[in-house]
Image (tube, rainbow, N blue to C red):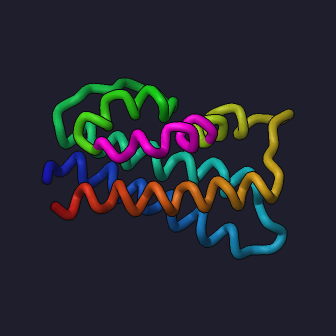
């Protein structure tokens, strides 16, 4: 595995740890959980592309990343709608005027955990 791929995975795992840890703290920090859930998935997808020599630029749209990632991990297509939904927490959520509900944060966390398992499996082959 390329060193840069390992860096993407390390950062993805740090986002995973933050999202999970924060979801257990009162008060439930909805913005943080949503943002880091999206970031975990994004970074794992970028790791797949990096490992396979596919350039991707500075992009946060998981549906666009899916287009290239599914060439290497076709089962990601099964999560298209969830990836589109998770993308909503990539940028705007970090700014005033945007927030997430506790229900949305729990959903983001669940989606991230489910997709992360598939993404991690890719790197165990």
> What residue span does the magenta drawing correspond to?
74-85
Q: Is residue 30 left or right of residue 119?
A: right
Residue ID at (22%, 29%): 54
Left or right placement of residue 59 versus residue 118 in this view: right
Residue 99 picture quarter: top right
Residue 23 horizontal side relative to residue 47, left or right? right
Relative to the observer, which residue lies in front, 88 or 77?
Answer: 77
Which residue is at 35% across, 54% downward?
119
Residue 122 is situated, as x and y percent measured from the top left of the image, at 25, 55
Q: Is residue 26 above or below residue 93?
A: below
Location of residue 95 (image quadrant) = top right
Count numbered badges in the picture: 0
Magenta stretch, main secondary structure, is helix
Q: Is residue 57 above or below residue 45?
A: above
Q: Would residue 75 be counted in the magenta stretch?
A: yes
Residue 15 pos. (x, y %): 51, 57
Quadrant of the image containing the C terminus: bottom left
Residue 55 place in picture, x, y as percent: 26, 26
Residue at horizontal 26%, vertical 37%? 49
Residue occupying image coordinates x 33% and y 26%? 56
Front residue (pair 42, 75): 75
| Residue 30 x/y as whole percent | 76, 56
- Picture quadrant where residue 123 is located: bottom left
Q: Is residue 67 magenta?
A: no
Q: Is residue 29 left or right of residue 5?
A: right
């Amino acid at each position: 595995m390329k060193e840069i791929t390992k860096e993407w995975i390390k950062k993805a795992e740090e986002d995973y740890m933050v999202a999970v840890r924060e979801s257990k703290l009162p008060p439930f920090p909805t913005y943080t959980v949503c943002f880091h859930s999206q970031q975990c998935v994004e970074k794992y997808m970028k790791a797949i592309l990096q490992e396979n020599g596919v350039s991707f630029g500075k992009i946060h749209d998981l549906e666009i990343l899916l287009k290239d990632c599914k060439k290497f991990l076709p089962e990601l297509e099964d999560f298209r709608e969830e990836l589109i939904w998770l993308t909503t927490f990539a940028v705007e959520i970090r700014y005033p005027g945007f927030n997430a509900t506790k229900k949305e944060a729990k959903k983001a966390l669940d989606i991230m955990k489910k997709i992360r398992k598939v993404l991690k499996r890719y790197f165990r082959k």
